[in-house]
Every structure is written in C-alpha cells, then in structure tokens.
Image (cartoon, rainbow, N blue to C red):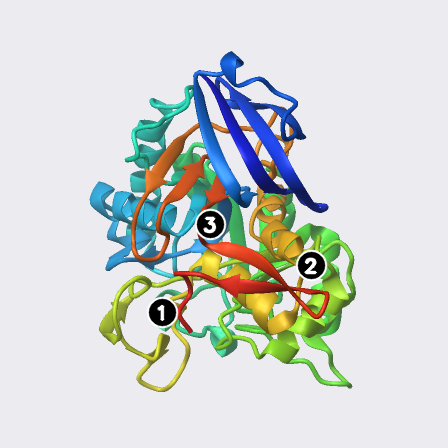
Amino acid sequence: MKLLIKNAHIITPYNILHNFELAVEGNKIKHIEPSGILYDKDFDEIINAKDNYLSPGFIDIHTHANSGYDTMDASFEAIDAMARFHIKNGVTGFLATTRTASTEETKKAIKNVVDYISRQKQNVGTLDTSSSAPAKVLGLYLEGPYFSMAKKGAQSPKYIKNPDIEELSNFLKLSGDNVKVVAIAPELPGAMEVITYLHTQGITVSAGHTDACFETAKKAFDHGVTQVTHVFNGMKGFTHREPGISGVALIDERISCEMICDGIHLHPGAMKLVVKAKGKDKIILISDSMMAAGLSDGEYTLGGQRVTVKDKEARLSDGTLAGSTLTLNKAIYNMVQMVGVPLEDAVRMATLNPARAIGLERSKGSIEIGKDAVYMAKMPGKMLPGIFIFFLLILMHNILTYVHNNSKMVLKLMNICPI
C-alpha cells in the first residue's frame, strides 16, 4: 500500500518542516518532501493534513497501568486494555512495567506480557487501517524488587530484597529477550555485579529507588548504568555537600533522566534544572502511570496498598506518591507550557529519546526516511478528536496549533490536557 500525507507540518527531532508531505510504502517511510513535489496519482490513499502537525508516535517506556488495569494483573485483558488506552493518547509503543512483588507474581506478569507480544507479532508487516489496532508492547521494564528500603516509595516493602543474579537470570530467560530495562538500587550488596551482567546482556540498567551517594552512583555509572528512574523521585536528595545520585546524574553526560512531568512529582523549576543540565537528548518523558490513569478520582489499589486519587494525585495513606495519572501527550504539553521547551524538543523527549534508550532508534522514534510506519488508525474521542495514528507516526489533527503572539511561538491546547 502506498500512502501520501500532504499539507503537514512535520515534527522531526531537529526542527519542524512546515508545509511538507510524507509518503509511506508498505510499512516504511519512503519520501519526505515539500508539498507539491509528489503526485497524487501515484498513491493508493491520500490524507490531507490541512496544515496540522505530523509527529512521531509517543513511546512510554515506564508505565505500570491505566484504565483500571495493571501489568501485574497478568492477563491478556489487562495488557490489551492498557494498549488501547495508550493509543488514544498518542502512545504507539510502550514497555509494560512491573513493580516489586513476589517472584511468582513477577514471573506470571512476565509470561503474560511475552504471550501478548507474541500475538501482536503475528500481525506486523503491513499498514493497518482498521481503526482498531492497539499500541504495541515493545517489551518489559522490571521495576523491582532490588531496591533501597529507605527510598522504596510506593513499592511493596514485603518483597524488597538485595539483587539476586540467579533470580534475575531466570526472569530474563522467561522473557525471551523482551526485558529492555531493569531498575536497581546500585548501593545494595551484589548490585555492581548485576549491573555489569545486565550491561553485557544489552539491557538498559536504570538506577532507581536508591539511596546511593555521589561516589557510589559514579561507580555504578562506570559499571554500566545509563539511566535514572524518575529523576529526583525515589532517590537520595541533592545537597551542596552530598549531591547524591541525582547530582551525578545531572552532570554525567552518559546518563539519561526519566522525568514525570505532571507538576506533582516535579516542580516546574526542577524540570527546568534538568533541561538545563541534560539538554534535549538526555531526557526521557515517562508517565509512571498507575491504574487510575484515564479514570476519575477515587480509591484504588497498588500491590495490596490502598491508593487515594484526588485532583489527579495518587497517594498512599501516609501521603507517599503512588505513581501518576499522567499520559505522555499531557507530559509533552507540560514541557512546552510549564518549562518553555520547544515543541520539537518536547516531542523528541517522548519519541526518539525513549526509542534510543531501548535500542530501537534505528527503526522507530522519529519521522525519517526508512523508519517504520506500520499501522494507521483514525481514533475519534473526547481527548483526541479526529486523530490519525501511525505506528511511530501520529498525525496530530486538531490538537496542537501554533499562533504568533508578539512574534513568539505559543503552544495552544485544543480539546486535550484539561488542566
């Protein structure tokens, strides 16, 4: 199938190409040209973007749950419901993320995700225009159980333990190479050995729920940690005499920082600090969503713990934050609106950067010739009316527009992200 999208403002990792057109052949991006260069008669289907924005589909590498379902439910229904919620919010690929639980619960969750991925792989290779395709599960993110009790956050204390390389090896074997990220507290006994092991396996190691000091964090980064889990949250705080792991993460150019940009987990000033320190290339927007994402305020559960959601904030009974109700489209909006990041940079943080973090940047994460475009769906709905979605291509129709205001480009919100 040959598809032409014309009259679009194409968001690339480097700039916005105004009034361009894009051609897809089979499941790959074939041409990106100024409008009017390609001939309509050469295509099977034509979409007129009508001067709206064409963006890469978002990739959420750290998302536990949404719409009342959780990765730890270990059911097809749960993962499928999560995937269908994600696609409605512009996320075309995600890592199903576990939490600290028993070994058996973790194994069940891993096996279920692997089974779901296997079923999805049976339908790849051609452009899907059925309007019913869910987001793709790109793998697994293991968040726990190898964490610091001092920085456990909402992780279940019952199952937190020191790193166990044999147990972890069994998790990886069960996953069939689908584990993409493992979070670990590097100060724990045996952690450095595990970090080295994971690094040699080609798995991204993220330092998370950690009380590591500056020097221990430096050592961990030298052993193969390349990422920190939800920066500033679940980690040793920064002080001028002991900057801790957050301090070294900000100054080490090898390290990418996950960020929950909901204005709850991070003050806008903290977001600006991370942007100043890490730039557009080393920030990964995540949702860290729990099951209340997409639902109303109320009472929920997380690993057997009661969670109260009020004004979109999810907290345990002691006030501890328990994940978020954020979606990546809102995170991008917040980066532009709260922090002043250019639209193309905010989109990069939710597309190319996460793709790179899990080794998929050669085929996904940006609109470039030769990259994937394997499905398209028109998804009507309150949050994203009239949206055209591609696998790692998303036409943002009637969602984001720019207006000139005193010669400054300002992002306007339309039918999305009510705040």
Q: Are marks 3 and 1 in contact (CB under 8 Å)?
A: no
Displayed quadrant of residue 217: bottom right
Image coordinates of residue 257 in percent, x first then y, are: 63, 61
The structure residue drawn at horizontal position 43% and vertical position 48%, both measured from the top left corner, is 90
Q: Earlier in the sequence, mark 3 or mark 1?
A: 3
Direction from residue 52 to residue 345 in the image, left or right: right
* Distance in Å between CA atoms under marks 3 and 1: 17 Å
Find disc 3 in the rendering and name its residue. 141
The residue nearer to you, when weighing 79 against 263, is 263
* Distance in Å between CA atoms under marks 3 and 2: 19 Å
Q: Is residue 360 above or below residue 256?
A: above
Direction from residue 235 to residue 45 in the image, left or right: left
Q: Quadrant of the N terminus?
A: top left
Q: Is residue 357 above or below residue 100?
A: above
Displayed quadrant of residue 311: bottom left
Image coordinates of residue 359 in percent, x first then y, are: 60, 38
Disc 3: CA contacts within 10 A as few (<14), some (14-19) or many (>=20): many
Q: Nearer the viewer, mark 3 or mark 1?
A: 3
Image coordinates of residue 34 in percent, x first then y, are: 67, 31
The structure residue drawn at horizontal position 50% and vertical position 47%, both measured from the top left corner, is 58
Q: Earlier in the sequence, mark 1 or mark 2?
A: 1
Find disc 2 in the rendering and name its residue. 220
Disc 1: CA contacts within 10 A as few (<14), some (14-19) or many (>=20): some
The residue nearer to you, when weighing 389 against 161, is 389
Q: Secondary structure at mark 3?
A: strand
Regarding residue 365, the answer to whether it shows in the image is no
The residue nearer to you, when weighing 282 against 401, is 401
The structure residue drawn at horizontal position 50% and vertical position 41%, both measured from the top left corner, is 50
Regarding residue 210, the answer to whether it shows in the image is yes
The structure residue drawn at horizontal position 50% and vertical position 13%, both measured from the top left corner, is 41
Find disc 1 in the rendering and name its residue. 156
